[in-house]
Image: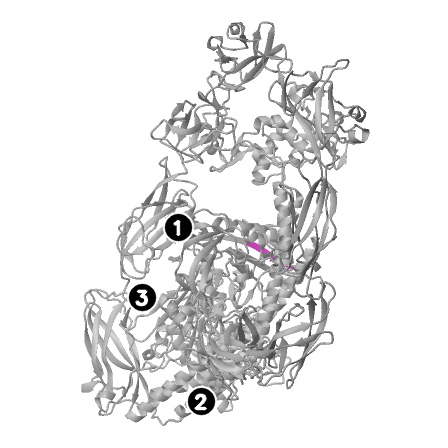
């Protein structure tokens, strides 16, 4: 340092001197003298002083430094050269006058070595002024750190120029500074570690670090020796420091200024030197009167202060003055943020709770802004600011997570994380109200119910250093609190709802200006850093990540509120969701209540934060989950049909949070109409080569078509090539060309091309030369989309198209083809040959003239008579073929046809030639023929043509007629195909021929009259074959013969045998045919197959067995069969045998109990074969008797039926017994027979209740019964009746009782049973009766009566009770009084389990609207109750009163369930205006531009302007305020110059009347030749002056700027140039925004591509680890198939039979009820489950409750029948001790049977901690082993080791009690079936959970693959877009407009304008400010914007 002390030894050779002021009371003026001290000792120095100041030897004096340090012998040696000393009478003497001390303050060497640490005030786009003030406050906090009382810091902004302003004063009541400390302050970069705070030399070990305090609030923040100097010269250009240290009578004053530096440099003086004025407090004699008047009062304040430091900054930068005035709220808020914890204490500004004394702060930072009179000073205490970010964070949070980070040494970091919940319709994470909200990136892929609001991408932690904020440093996150990459139990959006604070001490380095940390985040992320959680001030060494996740999950479940979904419409499955498990179920809703608005189906909306911005109509709202009615949720989705439909025609699903809530309906409609105008409208067609085709043109085949040029035009006539769907991914438009040939078989496309747009040729189609098919054509040009499907429609409307119709005809003939050639011709028969002529394309055409056809054939002679032409066909007529053919077969001949003169002049064909027409009939043989009767007589016939060839002809039938006997056959043969045939080939059978007969055969062709008939002779002889069979009966040894005639009837005994039958054979001539074995084979009989040929050869027939049934006739036949069959037959009729037994026949075999068997019982006497006999007669029927068990004999009846000769038995009836079979016994004489009858239950007579419970049944009102009622239909004897025609219905016997069941009546099932479950019972309190009654055929069947004891439901709300302060005055914009709402239950008390999310407060403007609010009512949610408020009530506090005045209605609604709500009465409220604050115009006027020339029009400022007084919400608030509005002209800089423009009549101000807060300004005109500077800008100030008694409100004036010119032309030119400049500035800003957005978008897309690839790789590794072959997952379909397979496996596992507990649990779900013990646990092993369930059988139905009150309630409701267990009364302690056979980690013996604690086998699906307590008390230390032997072995071993053995259970079902007893039924578990469902259920297998994990990974992988593909495509499209001509054109246009703007600015600057002194001063201040203003670095925020 320049003035560092040097030892006397080192400087003995140098010249040393000191400056001494005589300050003794006798000295009137403190004269200064120089005393040389070089080489002098202390005594010599004192002598020199006496001599210099003429001090006698006996006079006492004291020499001190300016800090009142006495110069004694020890100190004298350290005096430095140039030191200033005071000559005093005593050390504590008061200074009579001020002195001056010379100082040097050269910058310290650290200025060089640390100059590169940080640039000055890197403000990152923010105003640095608050941080400059912060440097001065840091010094003040350090100075006041040891104050015992209030630490006061006063900042005064003195902007009243009449008092010497502007100036800034920072004053504190700290310890003050000595002159040496003041000198040290002036040295740049002299930190507190190197300051010379001792008397003369630096003491590097003097600094002592303060002790650790909470939040490091140690005030040790004045650190580097840099900030104070930088701050004061950033604020102004001069600084004055005044300070008085504690205990000192002197005040020290020091001045530095830019002007002084410049003057010293100019005079070549030492720059870093100055003086410190030492004076008494209150001495202001050195202050000039005419400037800095405020210093007088400031210095006078010193007299009352013990100590202080005041920093006075003057010559303030003008822009700072403007900023400090206009943005007073903004910069004071930033200061409150920086020193939040110094001002409010360690817990911050917690406004919801009162502060404790120990946590409050004694720091008082007050800011006062004093403007020019008569404006009142503006006072603000930082403690009063309640909207700084930390206050917002603290008061919007609901929970805190406190932790510490340690890194070794004294490094200390305290951390705090706060949770900001989602409330109803918004995130409560606070937004900076003064910050621009960035556009968040679009993230639709992760949002079923996810929100991107909240913190977004902002860092979590703000960083505080020694208690003060380091504004530009933040920590994004730590690994343990970062958003997880995998799905976890906490919703991912919860990680966006946390904010945090880090408090560090000074072991972590910060930059010299305290704006950033050097390496805080790097050190905290070091592996050696240990994080611990702090609970109640105690550090807990736990896993911080697990603790944080649990805390976050608890916050989400307790505090997050929801949005209301209204109008449930059902559920659906969304296939657009890539994650399979999230595709269903999705509930559909009609509307939502959100942010005070109702959005409904059909409403048009606009999106935000999407790319692109969407407009559309709401289709429906979607919410994931299984819902049935109105619901609350933290988010959801909305389906919108994009508008306009003509442009999009698609439905999008977006998160509800992306609905633009500020967009108006008119703006949305306008945007849609603008989009419609961009649609393609028509096609423009041009023919570049001039060969245009007109519509319906006709062209020859082969004519070329094209080329064609097509342009797509919109409605404005502009060409376009893309569909204007989106600006980035717009769909390209293509033009499809199709040429369609309308053929007879339908339309056939002949050409199809798709044209792509070209910037040079638009859409171009080449020449088409394939038009060679005849017919009509259509040329179609259709605009299509380039989306792969070539869609020609968009949103149901066809895109622009063009159609051209034309026709192609044939060209001239070039060839011919043969027509249809006959396949064959007949010799001599003429035929025709057609020739068809065609052009070169094969089309038929007209034949040429003069055709001469030539025909040639080598094997035939061909000739024709004439030819003919018709159209395109040439016919050769009468063509004949002559030649010889063989028989009737065809032979092919080749014929050659030639037409000379054609390209193809020759054709050939083959033709078959057949014989000619029939000419002659030939019959063979020629002689007569002889045959035997029954034999054939074959004749062969042939038909020949004229050339004797056998010929064929259609219908050529030859007929043969036999003549000479009656009934002779006629034969015919068809010779149509062969020309030949055979007649009479069948045998000729004449009637009996006894002698020879002669016949004549006549042959002819009936349809060929020209062919003669032919006759032949035929002789017929008698036949020798068997002609007749004769049957007869002859017994052996008897000559009697009985011939049996044909069809003779024979009566014979049934079952007997008819034998001795014989037969004979005769021929046609009546001759006996001898029998032989050969003929015997041809004999056949029909009664047996066992025929002996040998007997038949003897003429013997087999015997006949007569049938046993005496009924019907039986046919018997004997036949001889060879070529012909000859037979004879007879009929046997059987007759009954002798009587044998009784036969009983029943009409019905089933009878109902008590009823008579329907029909009769027939009793008959039959023979041995069952044939009815005549043994039973009418006289003997009395001997018939009937008997049976339980038979009612009195009803029996026995009758004789004459018609059938049968006994009829009736009246069979059974009147008692059980249903089942009965044996009926029938007796007649010696005959007895039994018959079985089935007896069923009788008619339904009553209904029984199965498993009837104990009455009465207890049920809560409005609730149901879980156990169903099982009813059985019975007869009068109690037998079950399965009559399904009986219907059982529920009937209430009490009028107040109402029940609801799934079915109120139903028929019984096949077992006669019916089941009813009461879903809801509603009745008054008390006992009620319910009856089950049956009905059948209008008859009633009585049933059981059930008694129900209905208990009022304490959880059923019935009404709302609202309490509030009805006398409160509701001021607009303030807060409503607290509304206390109570949901009253049936019991009359409050409902305690009501959800706050179900209660809403509805507010709307207007009058009462019936009983329900209007649709547009605002919905508000209830607030969190305070500690002293009851949980049973709901409070609506801090609800803002609407900003618009008027009548309002409030109504409260509680949603009970779907479509059921409770409404309060409507409360009318009156909102009145707030305090009047400002004067504003009704409509904003334009900026006037005037001149002072003679024209009145050029001097008019305003024609008419209406002003009114309003509150801060623009409500009229001037009622009752009267006075005047004064209009004056002021300069823009605020001074009152003399050359200000004046109004008419040379007035400088005008007044207008103010009535009820309204005033009208009319005809405001400048006077002619008014003063004013040409081109200057002035302001019209409209200031209200209020009349009235009492304090008047402060109302801000209205200012209107205007431009003033001395001539009209200059005014016009400047106005036009200024307007042009503004337009260019706006356009340039837009262009720059576009380019910057694209640049940021490129960076963001690169990052997304990288992140997506990394995510995909990571998921591949996880899938491989889980056992899935990733290589097979090649596409989406494969992935979906795999997911479907896995889900099928899940469903299979779920449907597999598992053990379940089937006990009913009607209490589960009630408040504070966990459920029955049997439902609380699961056991995996079946054997273990059985024995444990049996062991706890007495406790299985015990209900576990959380509280004793809940248990007592169940006890009372069930009248003590239900056993209960409250957790409050369960004694439990953690029991982690090992099994009894284990001690000190070792086994006492080797156990058998795998012993294990029973409690370790229990699995708790929910309430694990509570269940652990319950079961530990129930099972204790009970142990399970395999079998009884192992159990006894284990117990013996434990007891022998002197250890208590607990109860032992075995898997086989045995139990050994703790006292050793076992055996007996009481210690043996029954089979599991006998436990009746009271058994612990089985958990789902591990395979189920593994598959769930695999499905989740596969779904994540599918999403990752799709996202990676999408972002890569987006990036490539974006890069192509950046290189597009459009973007290059935009860059070019930007450069051109920037150049044009510079030219205009140059012209404006060069315009000759006379400058006023005011504007000159202003410009000079601005220029100086530019020199000292540091460069600001803008923080860029990455965001995605839609490209414009």
Overall secondary structure of the magenta section = strand
Sequence order check, earlier mark of 1 and 2: 1
Q: Residues within 10 Å of mark 2 (few under 14, many from 20)?
A: some
**Place of residue 403 in the rendered image (x, y in percent of width and height, measured from the top left):** 57, 54
Name the residue that disc number 3 marks.
1512
Q: Would residue 21 be seen by someone viewing this image from the given angle?
A: no
Q: Would residue 312 be seen by someone viewing this image from the given angle?
A: yes
SS for dot 3: loop
| Quarter of image, res 9 | bottom right
Q: CA distance from mark 3 to mark 1?
A: 27 Å
Q: Name the residue at 24% across, 70% down.
A: 1508
Q: Given this view, does label 3 or label 1 mark the residue nearer the observer?
A: 1
Name the residue that disc number 2 marks.
1940
Q: Name the residue at 33% across, 29% down.
A: 1295
Q: Which residues are magenta?
A: 402-408
Q: Residues within 10 Å of mark 3 (few under 14, many from 20)?
A: some
């Amino acid at each position: 340092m320049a003035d560092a002390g040097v030892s006397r030894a080192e400087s003995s050779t140098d010249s040393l001197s000191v400056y001494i002021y005589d300050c003794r009371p006798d000295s009137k003026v403190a004269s200064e003298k120089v005393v040389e001290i070089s080489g002098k000792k202390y005594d010599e120095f004192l002598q020199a002083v006496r001599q210099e100041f003429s001090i006698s030897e006996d006079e006492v004096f004291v020499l001190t430094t300016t800090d009142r340090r006495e110069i004694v012998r020890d100190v004298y040696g350290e005096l430095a050269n140039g030191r200033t000393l005071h000559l005093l009478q005593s050390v504590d003497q008061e200074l009579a006058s001020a002195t001056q001390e010379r100082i040097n303050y050269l910058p310290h060497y650290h200025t060089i070595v640390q100059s590169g640490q940080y640039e000055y005030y890197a403000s990152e786009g923010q105003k640095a002024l608050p941080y400059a003030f912060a440097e001065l406050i840091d010094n003040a906090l350090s100075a006041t750190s040891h104050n015992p009382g209030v630490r006061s810091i006063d900042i005064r902004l003195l902007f009243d120029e009449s008092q010497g302003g502007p100036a800034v004063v920072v004053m504190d009541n700290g310890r003050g500074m000595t002159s040496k400390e003041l000198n040290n302050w002036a040295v740049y970069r002299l930190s507190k570690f190197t300051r010379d705070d001792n008397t003369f030399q630096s003491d590097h070990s003097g600094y002592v670090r303060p002790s650790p305090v909470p939040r490091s609030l140690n005030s040790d923040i004045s650190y580097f020796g840099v900030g104070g100097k930088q701050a004061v010269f950033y604020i102004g250009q001069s600084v004055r420091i005044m300070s008085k240290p504690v205990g000192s009578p002197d005040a020290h004053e020091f001045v530095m200024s830019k002007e002084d530096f410049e003057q010293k440099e100019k005079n070549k003086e030492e720059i870093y030197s100055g003086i410190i004025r030492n004076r008494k407090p209150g001495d202001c004699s050195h202050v000039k009167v005419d400037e800095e008047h405020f210093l007088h009062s400031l210095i006078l304040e010193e007299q009352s202060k013990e100590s202080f430091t005041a920093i006075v900054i003057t010559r303030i930068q003008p822009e700072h003055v403007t900023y400090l005035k206009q943005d007073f709220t903004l910069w004071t808020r930033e200061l409150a943020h920086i020193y939040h914890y110094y001002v409010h204490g360690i817990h911050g500004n917690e406004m919801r709770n009162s502060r404790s004394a120990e946590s409050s702060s004694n720091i008082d930072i007050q800011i006062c802004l004093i403007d020019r009179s008569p404006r009142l000073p503006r006072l603000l205490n930082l403690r009063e600011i309640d909207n700084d970010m930390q206050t917002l964070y603290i008061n919007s949070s609901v929970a805190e997570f406190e932790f510490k980070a340690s890194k070794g040494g004294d490094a200390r970091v305290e951390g705090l994380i706060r949770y900001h919940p989602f409330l109803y319709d918004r995130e409560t994470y606070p937004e900076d109200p003064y910050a621009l909200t960035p556009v968040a990136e679009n993230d639709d892929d992760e949002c079923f119910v996810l929100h991107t609001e909240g913190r977004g991408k902002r860092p979590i932690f703000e960083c505080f250093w020694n208690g003060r904020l380091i504004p530009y440093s933040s920590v994004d996150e730590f690994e343990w609190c970062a958003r997880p990459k995998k799905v976890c139990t906490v919703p991912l959006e919860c990680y966006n709802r946390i904010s945090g604070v880090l408090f560090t001490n000074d072991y972590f380095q910060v930059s010299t200006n305290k704006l950033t940390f050097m390496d805080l985040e790097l050190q905290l992320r070091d592996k050696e850093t240990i994080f611990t959680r702090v609970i109640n001030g105690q550090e807990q060494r736990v896993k911080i990540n697990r603790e944080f996740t649990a805390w976050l999950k608890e916050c989400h479940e307790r505090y997050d509120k929801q949005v209301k979904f209204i109008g449930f419409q059902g559920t659906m499955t969304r296939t657009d969701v890539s994650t399979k498990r999230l595709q269903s179920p999705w509930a559909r809703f009609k509307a939502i209540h959100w942010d005070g608005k109702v959005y409904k189906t059909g409403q048009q909306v606009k999106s935000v934060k999407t790319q692109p911005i969407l407009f559309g109509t709401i289709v429906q709202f979607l919410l994931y989950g299984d819902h049935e009615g109105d619901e609350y949720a933290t988010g959801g989705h909305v389906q919108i049909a994009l508008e306009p439909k003509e442009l999009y025609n698609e439905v999008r699903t977006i998160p509800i949070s992306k609905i633009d809530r500020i967009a108006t309906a008119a703006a949305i409609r306008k945007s849609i109409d603008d989009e419609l105008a961009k649609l393609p409208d028509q096609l423009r067609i041009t023919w570049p080569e001039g060969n245009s085709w007109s519509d319906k043109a006709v062209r020859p085949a082969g004519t070329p078509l094209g080329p064609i040029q097509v342009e797509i035009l919109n409605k404005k006539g502009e060409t376009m090539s893309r569909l204007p769907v989106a600006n980035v991914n717009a769909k390209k438009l293509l033009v499809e060309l199709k040429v369609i040939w309308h053929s007879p078989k339908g339309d056939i496309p002949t050409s199809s091309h798709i044209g792509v747009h070209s910037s040079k040729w638009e859409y171009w189609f080449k020449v088409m030369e394939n038009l060679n098919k005849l017919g009509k054509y259509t040329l179609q040009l259709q605009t299509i989309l380039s989306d792969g499907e070539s869609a020609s429609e968009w949103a149901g409307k066809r895109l622009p198209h063009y159609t051209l119709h034309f026709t192609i005809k044939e060209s001239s003939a070039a060839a011919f083809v043969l027509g249809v050639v006959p396949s064959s011709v007949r010799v001599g028969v003429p035929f025709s040959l057609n020739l068809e002529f065609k052009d070169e394309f094969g089309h038929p055409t007209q034949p040429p003239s003069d055709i001469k056809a030539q025909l040639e054939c080598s094997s035939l002679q061909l000739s024709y008579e004439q030819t003919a032409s018709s159209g395109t066909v040439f016919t050769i007529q009468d063509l004949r073929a002559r030649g010889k053919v063989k028989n009737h077969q065809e032979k092919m001949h080749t014929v050659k046809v030639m037409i000379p003169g054609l390209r193809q002049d020759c054709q050939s064909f083959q033709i078959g030639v057949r014989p000619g027409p029939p000419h002659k009939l030939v019959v063979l043989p020629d002689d007569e023929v002889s045959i035997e009767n029954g034999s054939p007589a074959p004749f062969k016939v042939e038909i020949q043509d004229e050339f004797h060839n056998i010929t064929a002809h259609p219908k050529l039938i030859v007929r043969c007629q036999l003549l000479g006997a009656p009934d002779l056959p006629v034969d015919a043969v068809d010779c149509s195909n062969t020309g030949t045939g055979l007649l009479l080939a069948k045998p000729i059978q004449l009637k009996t021929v006894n002698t020879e007969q002669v016949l004549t055969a006549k042959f002819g062709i009936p349809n060929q009259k020209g062919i003669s008939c032919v006759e032949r002779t035929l002789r017929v002889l008698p036949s020798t074959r068997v002609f007749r069979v004769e049957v007869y009966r002859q017994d052996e040894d008897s000559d009697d013969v009985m011939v049996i005639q044909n069809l003779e009837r024979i009566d014979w005994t049934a079952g007997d045998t008819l034998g001795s039958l014989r037969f004979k054979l005769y021929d046609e001539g009546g001759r006996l045919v001898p029998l032989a074995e050969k003929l015997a084979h041809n004999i056949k009989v029909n009664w047996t197959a066992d025929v002996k040929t040998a007997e038949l050869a003897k003429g013997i027939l087999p015997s006949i067995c007569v049938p046993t049934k005496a009924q019907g006739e039986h046919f018997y036949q004997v036949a001889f069969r060879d070529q012909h069959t000859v037979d004879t037959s007879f009929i046997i009729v059987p007759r009954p045998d002798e009587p044998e037994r009784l036969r009983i026949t029943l009409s019905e075999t089933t009878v109902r109990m008590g009823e008579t068997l329907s029909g009769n019982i027939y009793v008959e006497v039959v023979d041995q074969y069952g044939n009815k006999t005549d043994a039973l007669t009418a006289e003997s029927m009395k001997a018939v008797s009937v008997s049976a068990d339980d038979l009612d004999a009195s009803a029996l009846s026995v009758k004789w039926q004459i018609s059938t000769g049968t006994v009829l038995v009736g009246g069979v009836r059974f009147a008692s017994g059980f249903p089942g079979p009965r044996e009926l016994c029938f007796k007649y004489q010696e005959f007895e027979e039994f018959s079985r009858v089935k007896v069923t239950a009788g008619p339904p007579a009553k209904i029984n209740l199965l498993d009837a419970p104990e009455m009465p049944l207890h049920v809560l009102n409005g609730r149901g019964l879980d156990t169903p009622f099982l009813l059985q239909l019975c007869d009068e004897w109690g037998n079950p009746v399965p009559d399904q025609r009986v219907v059982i219905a529920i009937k209430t016997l009490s009028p107040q009782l109402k029940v609801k069941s799934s079915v109120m009546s139903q028929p019984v099932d096949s077992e006669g049973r019916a089941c009813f479950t009461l879903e809801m019972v509603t009745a008054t309190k008390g006992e009620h009766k319910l009856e089950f009654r049956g009905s059948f055929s209008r008859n009633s069947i009585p049933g059981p009566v059930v008694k129900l004891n209905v208990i009022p439901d304490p959880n059923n709300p019935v009404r709302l009770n609202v309490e509030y302060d009805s006398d409160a005055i509701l001021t607009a914009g303030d807060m409503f009084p607290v509304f206390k709402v109570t949901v009253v239950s049936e019991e009359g008390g409050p409902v305690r389990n009501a959800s706050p999310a179900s209660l809403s407060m509805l507010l709307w403007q207007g009058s009462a609207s019936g009983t329900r609010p209007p649709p547009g009512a605002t919905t508000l949610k209830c607030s969190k109750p305070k500690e002293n408020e009851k949980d049973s009530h709901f409070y609506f506090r801090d609800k803002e009163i609407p900003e618009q005045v008027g009548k309002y209605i409030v109504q409260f609604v509680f949603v009970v369930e779907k479509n059921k709500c409770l409404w309060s009465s409507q409360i009318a409220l009156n909102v009145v205006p707030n305090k009047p604050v400002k004067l504003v115009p009704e409509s904003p006027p334009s900026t006037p531009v005037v001149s002072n020339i003679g024209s009145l029009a050029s001097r008019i400022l305003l024609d008419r302007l209406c002003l009114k007084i309003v509150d801060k919400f623009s409500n009229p608030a001037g009622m009752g305020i009267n006075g005047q509005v004064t209009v004056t002209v002021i300069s823009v800089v605020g001074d009152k110059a003399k050359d200000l423009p004046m109004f008419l009549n040379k007035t400088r101000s005008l007044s207008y009347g103010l009535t009820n807060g309204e005033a009208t300004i009319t005809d405001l005109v400048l006077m002619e030749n008014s003063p004013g500077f040409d081109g200057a800008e002035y302001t019209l100030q409209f200031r209200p002056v209020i009349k009235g008694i009492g304090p008047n409100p402060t109302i801000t004036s209205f200012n209107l700027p205007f431009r003033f010119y001395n001539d009209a032309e200059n005014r016009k030119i400047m106005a036009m140039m200024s307007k042009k400049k503004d337009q260019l500035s706006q356009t340039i800003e837009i262009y720059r925004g576009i380019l910057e957005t694209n640049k940021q978008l490129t960076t963001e897309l690169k990052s997304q591509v990288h992140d997506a690839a990394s995510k995909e790789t990571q998921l591949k590794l996880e899938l491989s680890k889980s056992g899935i072959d990733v290589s097979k997952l090649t596409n989406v379909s494969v992935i979906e198939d795999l997911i479907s397979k896995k889900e099928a496996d899940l469903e299979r596992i779920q449907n597999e039979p598992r053990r379940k507990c089937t006990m009913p649990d009607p209490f589960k779900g009630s408040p504070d009820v966990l459920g029955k013990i049997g439902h609380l646990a699961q056991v995996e092993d079946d054997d273990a489950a059985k024995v444990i369930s049996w062991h706890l059988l007495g406790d299985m139905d015990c209900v576990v409750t959380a509280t004793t009150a809940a248990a007592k309630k169940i006890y009372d409701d069930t009248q003590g029948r239900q056993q209960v267990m409250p957790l409050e009364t369960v004694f439990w302690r953690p029991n982690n001790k090992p099994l009894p056979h284990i001690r000190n980690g070792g086994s006492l013996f080797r156990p058998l049977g795998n012993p294990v604690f029973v409690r370790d086998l229990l699995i708790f699906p929910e309430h694990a901690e509570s269940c652990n307590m319950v079961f530990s008390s129930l099972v204790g230390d009970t142990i399970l082993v395999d079998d009884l032997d192992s159990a006894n072995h284990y117990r013996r071993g434990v007891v022998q080791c002197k250890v208590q053995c607990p109860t032992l259970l075995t898997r086989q079902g045995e139990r050994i009690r703790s006292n050793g007893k076992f055996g007996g039924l009481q210690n043996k578990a029954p089979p599991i079936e006998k436990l009746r469902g009271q058994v612990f259920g089985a958990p789902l297998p591990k395979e189920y959970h593994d598959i769930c994990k695999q499905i989740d990974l596969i779904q994540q992988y599918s999403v990752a693959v799709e996202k990676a593909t999408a972002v890569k495509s987006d990036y490539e499209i974006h890069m192509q877009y950046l290189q597009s001509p459009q973007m290059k054109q935009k860059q070019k246009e930007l450069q051109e407009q920037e150049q044009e703007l510079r030219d205009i600015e140059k012209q404006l600057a060069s315009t000759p304008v006379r400058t006023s002194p005011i504007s000159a001063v202003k410009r000079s201040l601005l220029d100086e400010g530019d020199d000292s203003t540091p460069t600001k670095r803008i923080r860029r925020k990455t965001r995605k914007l839609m490209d414009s």
